[in-house]
Image: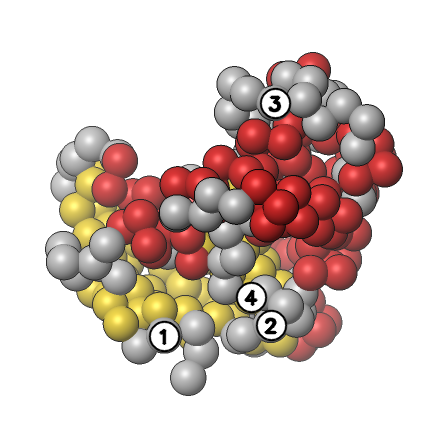
């Protein structure tokens, strides 16, 4: 069974459908790219996977998002525990208003870890995993806000890794970055797949071609096509997919 199985998912905002009866399994240990034109439901789908959709006024959700076989849309689900399992990277980095060290230690602390030596190890491990350790190891007590935007996004990735998630969700995580910083984040994600199931929303087809092992194509809230990236990009089955990949729909 896949970590993430989406079944008959329909989402509406104030009566207007954003997703219509979407069903798809997300492969484990791979990078899945959710692609499609603006307003097609990409971010809505992603936000359902960690219940961030709950924060949207007027949103109504039907269907199921199964994580390890359990429907996370059930009202009885512990959302804090869910979000520990589902790491999230937003479009823009949002470092906490504290030091570099405390940004990473924050998650383990709120989940009950108090041992300083263990926290030190987690901070170093996560900064190493995101190639930040060499850049910041001598200023861990400096405010995270003083990092460059690209460094801040890698810090946010390190912060997500610190609570040992099973899945990483990214909502256009390089869209606010310069090309070099975006390349660094992409490289880290490729290195992390296998350890984590990674799901990315991207509006950049070149990025999807570079990174994706699996592709989910949405159009006007409908799931049009999904499959291994090589098949979808090289031999799409659906006319709407061909049109989008050919630049006829943006």
Q: Residue furthest bottom?
A: 1
Residue under label 4:
197
Q: Are marks 2 and 4 in contact (CB under 8 Å)?
A: yes
Instruction: Measure the alpha-carbon separation of dots 2 and 4.
Output: 4 Å
The answer to which of 99 and 197 lies nearer the viewer is 99
Residue at image point 55% right, 20% down: 98
Find disc 3 in the rendering and name its residue.
99
> How far is disc 3 from disc 1 in space, using C-alphas?
35 Å
* Left or right: 204, with 37 as reference point: right
Question: Are circles 3 and 2 on residues that touch, CB within 8 Å?
Answer: no
The image's colouring method is secondary structure
Q: Residue at x 75, y 60 (%)?
A: 191
The numbered dot on residue 68 is 1
Task: Identify the residue at horizontal 48%, vertical 71% (top origin).
Answer: 26
Q: CA distance from mark 1 to mark 4?
A: 12 Å
Q: Nearer the N terminus, badge 2 or badge 4?
A: 2
Picture quarter with the C terminus: top right
Q: Earlier in the sequence, mark 1 or mark 4?
A: 1
């Amino acid at each position: 069974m896949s970590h993430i199985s989406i079944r008959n998912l329909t989402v509406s905002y104030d009566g207007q459908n954003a997703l219509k009866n979407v069903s798809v399994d997300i492969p484990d240990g791979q990078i899945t790219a959710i692609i499609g034109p603006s307003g097609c439901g990409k971010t809505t789908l992603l936000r359902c996977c960690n219940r961030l959709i709950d924060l949207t006024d007027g949103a109504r959700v039907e269907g199921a998002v199964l994580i390890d076989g359990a429907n996370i849309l059930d009202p009885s689900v512990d959302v804090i525990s869910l979000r520990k399992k589902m790491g999230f990277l937003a479009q823009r980095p949002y470092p906490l208003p504290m030091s570099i060290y405390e940004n990473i230690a924050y998650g383990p602390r709120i989940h009950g870890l108090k041992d300083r030596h263990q926290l030190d190890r987690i901070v170093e491990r996560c900064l190493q995993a995101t190639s930040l350790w060499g850049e910041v190891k001598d200023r861990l007590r400096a405010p995270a806000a003083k990092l460059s935007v690209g460094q801040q996004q890698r810090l946010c990735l390190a912060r997500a890794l610190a609570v040992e998630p099973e899945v990483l969700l990214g909502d256009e995580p390089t869209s606010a970055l310069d090309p070099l910083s975006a390349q660094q984040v992409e490289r880290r994600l490729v290195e992390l797949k296998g350890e984590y199931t990674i799901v990315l929303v991207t509006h950049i087809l070149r990025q999807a071609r570079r990174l994706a092992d699996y592709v989910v194509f949405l159009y006007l809230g409908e799931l049009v096509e999904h499959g291994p990236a090589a098949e979808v990009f090289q031999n799409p089955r659906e006319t709407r997919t061909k049109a989008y990949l050919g630049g006829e729909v943006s």
